[in-house]
Image (tube, grey):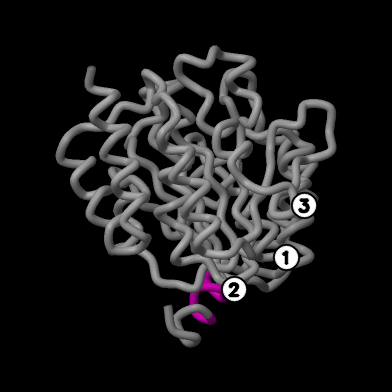
Amino acid sequence: MTEKSATQARKRAAPRPDQVASVKELHERLWKTGYGSISAAEAEFLAAAIDREKPASFVEIGTATGLSTVLIATALQRNGAGALTTIDYSKKFYGDLSKNIGFLVDEHFGEGSGGIRRLTGLTSADLATTIEGPVGMAFIDANHGHPWPTLDTLMIWPFLAEGALLFHHDLRSYQKFGASRSCGPKYLYDSIPDSQKTVIADVDRNMFWLRKNIEAAQFARRLTDCLLLPWDSAGRIGFLLARRIHDQLQAQYPPIVAHAFAIGFDRAKT
Protein backbone atom coordinates (compact mmCIF):
# COMPACT_ATOMS: atom_id res chain seq x y z
CA MET A 1 0.00 0.00 0.00
CA THR A 2 1.37 3.43 -0.96
CA GLU A 3 1.44 6.32 1.51
CA LYS A 4 -1.24 8.07 -0.55
CA SER A 5 -3.60 5.08 -0.51
CA ALA A 6 -2.98 4.57 3.21
CA THR A 7 -3.90 8.21 3.88
CA GLN A 8 -7.07 7.84 1.80
CA ALA A 9 -7.98 4.67 3.69
CA ARG A 10 -7.58 6.47 7.02
CA LYS A 11 -9.81 9.29 5.82
CA ARG A 12 -12.49 6.81 4.76
CA ALA A 13 -12.19 5.14 8.15
CA ALA A 14 -12.75 8.33 10.15
CA PRO A 15 -15.39 7.53 12.81
CA ARG A 16 -18.66 9.36 13.21
CA PRO A 17 -19.15 11.02 16.62
CA ASP A 18 -21.59 8.28 17.71
CA GLN A 19 -18.93 5.64 17.01
CA VAL A 20 -16.30 7.10 19.32
CA ALA A 21 -16.42 4.98 22.45
CA SER A 22 -14.07 3.18 24.75
CA VAL A 23 -13.15 -0.39 23.90
CA LYS A 24 -14.97 -1.58 27.01
CA GLU A 25 -18.16 0.27 26.05
CA LEU A 26 -18.05 -1.11 22.54
CA HIS A 27 -17.44 -4.62 23.79
CA GLU A 28 -20.40 -4.42 26.16
CA ARG A 29 -22.58 -3.18 23.33
CA LEU A 30 -21.58 -5.86 20.79
CA TRP A 31 -20.69 -9.01 22.76
CA LYS A 32 -23.17 -11.90 23.00
CA THR A 33 -22.97 -15.35 24.56
CA GLY A 34 -22.04 -18.03 22.05
CA TYR A 35 -20.13 -15.74 19.70
CA GLY A 36 -16.75 -17.08 20.82
CA SER A 37 -15.41 -13.55 20.67
CA ILE A 38 -12.56 -11.96 22.58
CA SER A 39 -13.29 -10.80 26.11
CA ALA A 40 -13.38 -7.18 27.27
CA ALA A 41 -9.98 -7.61 28.95
CA GLU A 42 -8.53 -9.06 25.74
CA ALA A 43 -10.00 -6.21 23.71
CA GLU A 44 -8.32 -3.71 26.03
CA PHE A 45 -5.04 -5.68 25.79
CA LEU A 46 -5.16 -5.31 22.00
CA ALA A 47 -6.23 -1.68 22.11
CA ALA A 48 -3.46 -0.78 24.56
CA ALA A 49 -0.89 -2.19 22.14
CA ILE A 50 -2.41 -0.20 19.27
CA ASP A 51 -2.35 2.94 21.42
CA ARG A 52 1.29 2.33 22.27
CA GLU A 53 2.68 1.13 18.93
CA LYS A 54 0.40 2.95 16.44
CA PRO A 55 0.88 0.38 13.66
CA ALA A 56 1.00 1.64 10.08
CA SER A 57 -1.22 -1.28 9.04
CA PHE A 58 -3.06 -4.16 10.69
CA VAL A 59 -4.04 -7.63 9.42
CA GLU A 60 -6.60 -9.87 11.13
CA ILE A 61 -6.85 -13.57 10.24
CA GLY A 62 -10.22 -14.90 11.34
CA THR A 63 -13.09 -12.39 11.13
CA ALA A 64 -15.99 -14.50 12.49
CA THR A 65 -18.66 -12.12 13.88
CA GLY A 66 -16.45 -9.10 13.29
CA LEU A 67 -16.50 -8.03 16.95
CA SER A 68 -12.72 -7.92 17.24
CA THR A 69 -12.62 -6.30 13.80
CA VAL A 70 -14.80 -3.42 15.02
CA LEU A 71 -12.75 -3.00 18.19
CA ILE A 72 -9.43 -3.04 16.32
CA ALA A 73 -10.72 -0.60 13.69
CA THR A 74 -11.97 1.78 16.38
CA ALA A 75 -8.62 1.69 18.20
CA LEU A 76 -6.79 2.33 14.94
CA GLN A 77 -9.07 5.27 14.11
CA ARG A 78 -8.64 6.75 17.56
CA ASN A 79 -4.88 6.75 17.07
CA GLY A 80 -4.85 7.91 13.46
CA ALA A 81 -3.08 4.64 12.75
CA GLY A 82 -3.10 2.50 9.63
CA ALA A 83 -5.78 0.66 7.69
CA LEU A 84 -7.18 -2.75 8.64
CA THR A 85 -7.50 -5.86 6.46
CA THR A 86 -9.43 -8.84 7.81
CA ILE A 87 -9.69 -12.25 6.13
CA ASP A 88 -11.71 -15.39 6.78
CA TYR A 89 -12.06 -18.69 4.96
CA SER A 90 -15.81 -18.86 5.59
CA LYS A 91 -18.48 -16.65 4.09
CA LYS A 92 -21.06 -17.38 6.82
CA PHE A 93 -20.60 -17.19 10.59
CA TYR A 94 -20.21 -20.72 11.98
CA GLY A 95 -22.39 -19.90 15.02
CA ASP A 96 -25.33 -18.72 12.91
CA LEU A 97 -25.28 -19.64 9.23
CA SER A 98 -27.98 -17.05 8.49
CA LYS A 99 -25.40 -14.32 9.17
CA ASN A 100 -22.51 -13.28 6.94
CA ILE A 101 -18.96 -13.28 8.18
CA GLY A 102 -18.26 -9.94 9.85
CA PHE A 103 -21.91 -9.03 10.27
CA LEU A 104 -21.13 -6.86 13.31
CA VAL A 105 -18.93 -4.67 11.11
CA ASP A 106 -21.96 -3.91 8.96
CA GLU A 107 -24.22 -3.38 11.95
CA HIS A 108 -21.79 -1.01 13.67
CA PHE A 109 -20.28 0.99 10.81
CA GLY A 110 -23.11 0.73 8.27
CA GLU A 111 -22.42 1.57 4.65
CA GLY A 112 -18.70 1.72 3.94
CA SER A 113 -17.78 -0.70 6.74
CA GLY A 114 -15.49 1.81 8.45
CA GLY A 115 -12.92 1.69 5.67
CA ILE A 116 -12.05 -1.91 6.59
CA ARG A 117 -10.83 -4.17 3.80
CA ARG A 118 -12.74 -7.45 4.19
CA LEU A 119 -11.84 -10.65 2.33
CA THR A 120 -13.58 -14.03 2.53
CA GLY A 121 -12.90 -17.46 1.06
CA LEU A 122 -9.20 -17.06 1.87
CA THR A 123 -6.66 -18.56 4.25
CA SER A 124 -3.28 -17.25 5.35
CA ALA A 125 -1.84 -19.07 2.33
CA ASP A 126 -3.43 -16.30 0.23
CA LEU A 127 -1.68 -13.46 2.04
CA ALA A 128 1.13 -13.35 -0.51
CA THR A 129 -1.32 -12.24 -3.18
CA THR A 130 -3.62 -10.07 -1.04
CA ILE A 131 -1.46 -7.89 1.23
CA GLU A 132 1.70 -5.85 1.01
CA GLY A 133 4.26 -5.46 3.74
CA PRO A 134 5.43 -4.25 6.05
CA VAL A 135 2.45 -4.99 8.32
CA GLY A 136 2.67 -3.11 11.61
CA MET A 137 0.55 -5.46 13.74
CA ALA A 138 -1.57 -8.60 13.29
CA PHE A 139 -4.11 -10.75 15.12
CA ILE A 140 -4.75 -14.46 14.47
CA ASP A 141 -7.99 -15.98 15.71
CA ALA A 142 -8.93 -18.59 13.13
CA ASN A 143 -8.63 -22.41 13.08
CA HIS A 144 -7.11 -23.41 16.43
CA GLY A 145 -6.38 -26.97 15.34
CA HIS A 146 -2.67 -27.70 15.07
CA PRO A 147 -0.81 -26.86 12.82
CA TRP A 148 -2.96 -23.89 11.72
CA PRO A 149 -1.83 -21.26 14.27
CA THR A 150 1.78 -22.18 13.43
CA LEU A 151 1.08 -22.08 9.70
CA ASP A 152 -0.79 -18.76 9.98
CA THR A 153 2.22 -17.38 11.86
CA LEU A 154 4.66 -18.67 9.23
CA MET A 155 2.54 -17.26 6.41
CA ILE A 156 2.28 -13.73 7.81
CA TRP A 157 5.72 -13.52 9.43
CA PRO A 158 7.60 -12.41 6.27
CA PHE A 159 5.16 -9.50 5.86
CA LEU A 160 5.47 -8.22 9.44
CA ALA A 161 7.62 -5.18 10.08
CA GLU A 162 10.65 -5.80 12.26
CA GLY A 163 9.57 -5.49 15.89
CA ALA A 164 5.86 -5.84 15.04
CA LEU A 165 3.49 -7.62 17.43
CA LEU A 166 1.53 -10.70 16.36
CA PHE A 167 -1.42 -11.54 18.64
CA HIS A 168 -3.01 -14.96 19.06
CA HIS A 169 -6.28 -15.84 20.76
CA ASP A 170 -7.42 -18.98 22.63
CA LEU A 171 -4.16 -20.02 24.22
CA ARG A 172 -6.19 -22.17 26.62
CA SER A 173 -8.66 -23.61 24.10
CA TYR A 174 -7.09 -27.05 24.52
CA GLN A 175 -8.21 -26.97 28.16
CA LYS A 176 -11.69 -25.74 27.34
CA PHE A 177 -12.58 -27.72 24.23
CA GLY A 178 -10.24 -30.72 24.16
CA ALA A 179 -6.79 -31.22 22.68
CA SER A 180 -8.11 -33.27 19.73
CA ARG A 181 -9.06 -30.08 17.89
CA SER A 182 -7.70 -26.97 19.57
CA CYS A 183 -4.15 -27.25 20.91
CA GLY A 184 -2.57 -25.21 18.09
CA PRO A 185 -2.16 -21.92 20.00
CA LYS A 186 -0.59 -23.75 22.97
CA TYR A 187 1.90 -25.63 20.77
CA LEU A 188 2.91 -22.39 19.09
CA TYR A 189 3.21 -20.52 22.38
CA ASP A 190 5.46 -23.21 23.86
CA SER A 191 7.74 -23.04 20.80
CA ILE A 192 8.64 -19.36 21.26
CA PRO A 193 11.28 -18.10 23.75
CA ASP A 194 9.93 -16.27 26.80
CA SER A 195 11.80 -13.12 25.82
CA GLN A 196 9.74 -12.81 22.62
CA LYS A 197 6.23 -13.40 23.97
CA THR A 198 3.81 -11.90 26.48
CA VAL A 199 0.58 -13.36 27.89
CA ILE A 200 -2.32 -11.17 28.94
CA ALA A 201 -2.30 -10.70 32.72
CA ASP A 202 -6.02 -11.35 33.31
CA VAL A 203 -7.36 -14.44 35.10
CA ASP A 204 -8.15 -16.35 31.89
CA ARG A 205 -4.68 -15.85 30.31
CA ASN A 206 -6.15 -16.72 26.92
CA MET A 207 -4.37 -14.23 24.64
CA PHE A 208 -0.69 -13.66 23.90
CA TRP A 209 1.56 -11.83 21.51
CA LEU A 210 4.85 -12.60 19.79
CA ARG A 211 7.24 -9.85 18.83
CA LYS A 212 9.14 -10.10 15.58
CA ASN A 213 12.60 -9.75 17.03
CA ILE A 214 13.52 -13.43 16.94
CA GLU A 215 16.68 -14.38 15.06
CA ALA A 216 15.56 -15.91 11.74
CA ALA A 217 17.37 -19.26 12.08
CA GLN A 218 16.09 -19.75 15.63
CA PHE A 219 12.55 -18.89 14.56
CA ALA A 220 12.68 -21.39 11.68
CA ARG A 221 14.11 -24.12 13.91
CA ARG A 222 11.52 -23.69 16.65
CA LEU A 223 8.54 -23.63 14.29
CA THR A 224 9.98 -26.63 12.42
CA ASP A 225 9.88 -28.56 15.69
CA CYS A 226 6.33 -27.32 16.25
CA LEU A 227 5.17 -28.60 12.83
CA LEU A 228 6.43 -32.06 13.76
CA LEU A 229 4.11 -32.31 16.78
CA PRO A 230 0.98 -34.47 16.10
CA TRP A 231 -1.63 -32.56 14.11
CA ASP A 232 -5.14 -32.10 15.55
CA SER A 233 -8.19 -33.59 13.87
CA ALA A 234 -9.35 -30.03 13.13
CA GLY A 235 -6.02 -29.13 11.57
CA ARG A 236 -6.29 -31.43 8.56
CA ILE A 237 -5.47 -29.89 5.20
CA GLY A 238 -6.46 -30.87 1.68
CA PHE A 239 -3.81 -31.84 -0.84
CA LEU A 240 -4.08 -28.78 -3.13
CA LEU A 241 -3.90 -26.33 -0.22
CA ALA A 242 -1.05 -28.34 1.29
CA ARG A 243 0.88 -28.02 -1.96
CA ARG A 244 0.45 -24.23 -1.95
CA ILE A 245 1.54 -23.99 1.67
CA HIS A 246 4.55 -26.21 1.03
CA ASP A 247 5.63 -24.11 -1.93
CA GLN A 248 5.37 -20.87 0.04
CA LEU A 249 7.29 -22.31 2.99
CA GLN A 250 9.95 -23.47 0.57
CA ALA A 251 10.21 -19.99 -0.95
CA GLN A 252 10.30 -18.06 2.35
CA TYR A 253 12.24 -20.29 4.78
CA PRO A 254 15.15 -22.75 5.01
CA PRO A 255 14.33 -26.18 3.50
CA ILE A 256 13.82 -27.79 6.93
CA VAL A 257 10.53 -25.89 7.42
CA ALA A 258 8.81 -27.15 4.25
CA HIS A 259 10.26 -30.61 4.92
CA ALA A 260 8.75 -30.68 8.43
CA PHE A 261 5.39 -29.57 7.00
CA ALA A 262 5.51 -32.41 4.44
CA ILE A 263 6.27 -34.94 7.19
CA GLY A 264 3.43 -33.65 9.35
CA PHE A 265 1.03 -33.73 6.40
CA ASP A 266 1.94 -37.34 5.56
CA ARG A 267 1.54 -38.41 9.18
CA ALA A 268 -1.86 -36.73 9.45
CA LYS A 269 -3.18 -38.72 6.48
CA THR A 270 -2.69 -42.04 8.27
Q: Which residues are magenta?
A: 7-12
Q: Quadrant of residue 171?
A: top right
Establish if 244 lies above or below 66. below
Q: Give amino acid for label 3.
A: Ala
Q: Which residue is mark 3?
A: 21
- Other residues around mark 2 within 10 Å, as few (<14) / some (14–19) / many (≥20): some
Going by the image, does 52 lie left or right of 130?
Answer: right
Q: Position of residue 72 (x, y in %)?
A: 63, 53
In the rendered image, residue 111, in percent from the top left (x then y), is placed at 46, 55
Identity of the residue drawn at 32% across and 62% down: 128
Q: Residues within 10 Å of mark 3 (few under 14, many from 20)?
A: some
Q: Nearer the viewer, mark 1 or mark 2?
A: 2
The answer to which of marks 2 and 3 sits earlier in the sequence is: 3
Q: CA distance from mark 1 to mark 3?
A: 9 Å
Mark 2: secondary structure = loop
Predominant SS along the magenta part: helix
Q: Are marks 1 and 3 in contact (CB under 8 Å)?
A: no
The residue mark sitting in front, 2 or 3, is 2
Instruction: Determine whether the residue tagged by mark 3 lies in a helix, strand or loop.
Output: loop
Q: Is residue 16 left or right of residue 140?
A: right
